[in-house]
Image (spheres, rainbow, N blue to C red):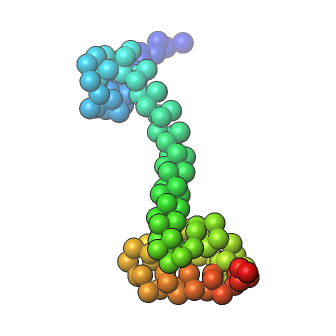
Amino acid sequence: MARVKRGVTAHAKHKKTLDAAKGFRGRRKNTIRAAKAAVDKSMQYAYRDRKNRKRTFRALWIQRLNAAVRELGLTYSVFIAGLTKAGVTVDRKVMSELAITEPAAFKALVDQAKAALPQAA
């Protein structure tokens, strides 16, 4: 059986790892052993943080909505309950954008939510 020389393959793999480590500090950017560990860890962080980004943005939209509806005399939870009873299905991202860019349209949503709620005695 013929001998297989793996220099080309190994070089390509190392190059791919070192390209991914571009911008890292110290030996992590130019030593294959350190770079491989750093790139592997960075991929784990990237995977985790793609999930966390969704969580963080949803929290931001909720904070913005809460601030916007409090100016109009409601709280976030009461507002969402009113929208649910009114049958309005607009997601939090869009409502947050409405509150910032189209205050009149957002006020119409709040009025709909208020109308769907039973009046407090």
Total marks shown come to 0
Say if 110 sits above or below 63 in the image: below
Please identify the quarter of the rendering in which residue 115 is found.
bottom right
Please identify the quarter of the rendering in which residue 28 is found.
top left
Q: Confirm whether residue 46 shows in the render.
A: yes
Measured from the top left, where is residue 12 in percent x and y?
A: 36, 27
Say if 3 sits above or below 15 in the image: above
Q: Is residue 81 left or right of residue 101?
A: right
Q: Residue at x 49, y 42 (%)?
A: 49
- Closer to the camera, 103 or 88? 103
Q: Is residue 68 left or right of residue 86?
A: left
Q: Residue at x 26, y 32 (%)?
A: 23
Q: Is residue 111 left or right of residue 71?
A: right
Measured from the top left, where is residue 7 in percent x and y?
A: 36, 17
Measured from the top left, where is residue 88 in percent x and y?
A: 65, 81
Locate the N terminus by quadrant.
Answer: top right
- Closer to the camera, 85 or 50? 85
Locate the C terminus by quadrant.
Answer: bottom right
Q: Confirm whether residue 12 shows in the render.
A: no
Say if 8 sits above or below 47 in the image: above
